[in-house]
Each structure stands twice: as C-alpha cells, then as structure tokens.
Image: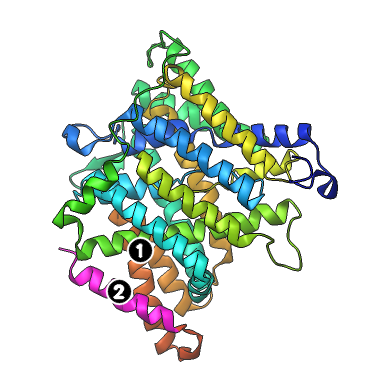
C-alpha cells in the first residue's frame, strides 16, 4: 500500500493520511444532511409526494455515492480528493428542474446519468479539455459565483430570513420566530468558527446549532443514535424508468443535460487543480494522472445517478485534508470509510433540519462568490455577460438560465467590441444551442 501510493517519495505516512482523510470527511459531512433535505424538497410545503425523493433513500445514496467516488479517485486517480453530490448541482436538480420545471425527479436522474456518460466519453477522447479551454475563464468564474449566490438565496429562504412578498416579490422575514432565530444563531457560530480557522467549521456549526435547537425545544431529541440502514429501494435504479417515457426526450432536457455537464466540468477541473497545487502534486504546471482523476469523477456521477442522487463531483473541502497532511489517494480511502460508517447513524442525523443546514448553504455561497475577484470588471464586454450569468441565477431561480444568458451575451459583446478572434468557435455552438433553449423553453 505504501509503495502503491508512494508514501516515501511524497514524504507521508499512514497517520498523516488518516488524519487528512478524517479532516476532509468532517469538512464535507454536512452533505449527508443537506443533500437529502434538498432533493426531498423538505423546506417546500404543500407539494405532492410524487415530487419528493425519499429522504432516507437519498441519504443512503449520498453516503454510498460519496464512498464509491472517493474510493475510485483514491485508487485510480491517487489524489487526496474526496467526492460527494455537489452543492449547486443538487439545488439545480431540486429547485430548478423538479420544482421549477415540474419535471419528475426520475427524469432529472436520467439527465444526470446522461451527463455522466458524456463526461466519461469526452474525457476518454480528450475533447473535455478542449471544451473547457474554449469557455472563457471569466465566464467560468461567473458561473461559480452565480451558483454561490443561488445557494445563499436558498439558505436565507430555508432560514426564514427571506420570504416571498406579493408587493416586492421578496422581503425580510419574521426574525422573532424560533426556527429563524436558531438559523441566525447557527450562522453566527459558523462564521466565528470559520473566521478562527477551525477545520470542519461548517460541520461543527451544524452540530452546535442542533444541540441548541434541542435544548430550546425547536428540534425533537432523537430516540436512537444507531439504527438499521434506511432502504435505498425508493430511488435505486429509478433512473432507468425515465428512458422509456417519451416525454423525457424533449428539447428542454438538452439544456438540463448541458447544465449538469458544464457545471460539473468547471467544478471538477477547478477543484482538482486547486487541491493538487496545494498538495504540491503539480509537475511543470501539469497534473499527473489528470485523465484518471477526471474519469473517476464521471464514474462517480453515473453510479450516483443509479443509486438515486444528483451529480457527484470533487469537493474543494478536500483542501482541509491536504492542510492536515494528506498527499495521496489513501486519504480518499479513509474519507470513503467514514462515509460508509455514517450509514448507521441516520437517526442521529434526523435532528439536522432546514434551520440547521441554512447557515451551511450561506457559508458555501460566500466561499463560491470569492471567484468574482478574477473577473475583469473594467472591460465592459466581459463584465456584461459575467454579471448577467451571475445575477440571473438567483433572480430566475435557475442555474441553467444564468449559464444560457451569459453564453448568449458573450459572443454579442465581444463581436461588437471587435474581439472576434478571441471567441472560440465552440462558443458559437453554445450560442445557438442556448438560443434554441429559450425559443423552445415553453
């Protein structure tokens, strides 16, 4: 094992890798709670059961998909990089596709699976890198920031801090309500922990908030800590039922598949480079085993869709594990082990409600919006598509709409500015695709 992961060459040890893997798990363990609540649309009242995914089944799918993805990344990619259903992509799945477009969640899983297959094929053929390079770096940063704003907006809604208003669309909620006060407390605690540099601050913030909620009677105290693993039957294999439904094969689904594909592109590539650079694994500004790492991500996405969860992707929280000493894929195996172990603690996680997870969404949004600093705001032809990409995501409640509008405006502003040579031919293809997306949207 030491020889396979090159412990000696990289100057690491079992203890160092174990602590790194544990730290990564603690930093991203919130996904075990947030993802089931998101995909089951727990914060939305009055929905028919058919629109909601089974909470327990999604929990199991999340844990297993995260474990399998991390194992594949560890063994194949050999990077200290853990995978789990991505934040932002799960919000797009639940709030845009299922809630907004009224598309069955089985069809949404079908779109995830297809995007994973395309991701896999594009990686094997080398086209993936060409497509990523064709998209302007400014728009990549705008997409990340826009998703951050969208996630934060959802967090404020889940907390009851922002509510709908007939006159102004949105307004400040009643801050005197118990659940809202609990969410505000959780936000303050998490901000303090993050500011002080605590590893796993988001996870610990949720734990402290849940305990306070139980003390004040806002959250029910669990009767068990460990119990049998919930059944995954309600979601397992349901993805295949969508392919036999003629309504699945629509023009609208093209835009949905492309959105899953693009966001996973940006998310995985950016995270991989950032974590590898932090761990000192970059060689001559290139990533060793980059192809294997990207294949690992696509395999995890396909497996996750079959199990019953949204796109599984690399987590930037892995950087916390690297900071704790992780340098090899063995740390990813350790993280995977903890995800498997978490399957038996479902009753304990039942205390984590929407007001408890809301601060995590807001904080993740803060981290994602930091990419705005890389956009050239002094260049109007860049600022317009970047700003429209970013701002339309939360305002339209749709990540896909934000990406589409940005990709349509970019060629227009660049052509008018006389920078035709700076536009990659692939961007014209995106322009046509997303224009058709809006024309046939209804």
Instruction: Give the prevailing secondary structure in the magenta stretch.
Output: helix
The answer to whether residue 38 is visible is: yes
Residue 132 numbered tag: none
Residue 258 numbered tag: 1
Residue 362 in the image, given as x and y percentages of width and height: 46, 41
- Badge 2: residue crowd in 10 Å (few <14, some 14–19, many ≥20): some
Q: Is residue 260 left or right of residue 251?
A: right
Where residue 52 sits, quadrant-wise, is top left
Question: In the image, is residue 433 part of the stretch drawn in magenta?
Answer: yes
Q: What segment carries the magenta color?
A: 425-442
Residue 296 in the image, given as x and y percentages of width and height: 54, 52
Which residue corresponds to the image point at 46% horizontal and 10% vertical from the top-left? 215
Residue 110 in the image, given as x and y percentages of width and height: 29, 51
Residue 380 in the image, given as x and y percentages of width and height: 46, 78
Q: Is residue 137 left or right of residue 57?
A: right
Alpha carbons under labels 1 and 2: distance apart? 10 Å
Residue 433 numbered tag: 2
Q: Quadrant of the C terminus?
A: bottom left
Query: SS for tag 2?
Result: helix
């Amino acid at each position: 094992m030491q020889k396979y992961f090159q412990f000696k060459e990289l100057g690491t040890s079992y203890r160092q890798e174990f602590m790194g893997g544990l730290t990564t798990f603690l930093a991203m363990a919130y996904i075990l709670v947030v993802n089931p609540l998101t995909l089951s649309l727990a914060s939305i009242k009055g929905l028919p059961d058919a629109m909601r995914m089974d909470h327990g089944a999604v929990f199991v799918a999340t844990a297993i998909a995260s474990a399998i993805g991390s194992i594949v990344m560890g063994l194949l990619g050999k990077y200290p990089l853990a995978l789990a259903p991505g934040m932002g992509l799960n919000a797009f799945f639940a709030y845009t596709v299922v809630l907004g477009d009224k598309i069955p969640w089985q069809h949404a899983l079908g779109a995830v699976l297809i995007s994973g297959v395309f991701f896999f094929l594009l990686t094997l053929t080398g086209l993936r890198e060409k497509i990523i390079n064709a998209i302007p770096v400014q728009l990549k940063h705008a997409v990340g920031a826009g998703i951050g704003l969208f996630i934060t907006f959802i967090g404020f809604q889940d907390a009851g801090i922002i509510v709908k208003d007939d006159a102004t669309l949105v307004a400040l909620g009643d801050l005197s309500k118990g659940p809202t006060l609990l969410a505000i407390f959780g936000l303050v605690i998490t901000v303090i922990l993050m500011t002080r540099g605590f590893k796993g601050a988001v996870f610990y913030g949720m734990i402290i908030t849940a305990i306070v909620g139980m003390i004040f009677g806002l959250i029910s105290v669990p009767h068990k800590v460990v119990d049998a693993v919930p059944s995954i039957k309600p979601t397992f294999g349901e993805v295949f039922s969508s392919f036999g439904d003629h309504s699945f094969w629509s023009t609208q689904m093209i835009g949905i598949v492309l959105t899953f594909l693009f966001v996973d592109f940006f998310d995985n590539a950016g995270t991989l480079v950032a974590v590898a650079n932090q761990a000192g694994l970059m060689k001559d500004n290139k990533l060793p085993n980059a192809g294997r790492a990207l294949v690992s991500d696509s395999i995890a996405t396909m497996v996750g869709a079959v199990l019953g969860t949204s796109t599984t992707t690399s987590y930037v929280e892995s950087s916390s594990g690297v900071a704790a000493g992780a340098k090899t894929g063995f740390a990813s195996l350790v993280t995977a082990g903890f995800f498997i172990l978490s399957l038996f603690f479902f009753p304990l996680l039942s205390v984590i409600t929407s007001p408890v997870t809301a601060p995590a969404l807001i904080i993740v949004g803060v981290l994602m919006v930091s990419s705005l600093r890389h956009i050239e705001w002094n260049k109007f032809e860049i600022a317009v598509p970047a700003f429209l990409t970013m701002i339309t995501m939360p305002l339209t409640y749709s990540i896909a709409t934000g990406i589409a509008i940005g990709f349509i405006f970019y060629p227009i502003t660049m052509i008018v500015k006389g920078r035709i040579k700076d536009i990659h031919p692939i961007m014209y293809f995106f322009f046509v695709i997303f224009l058709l997306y809006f024309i046939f949207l209804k």
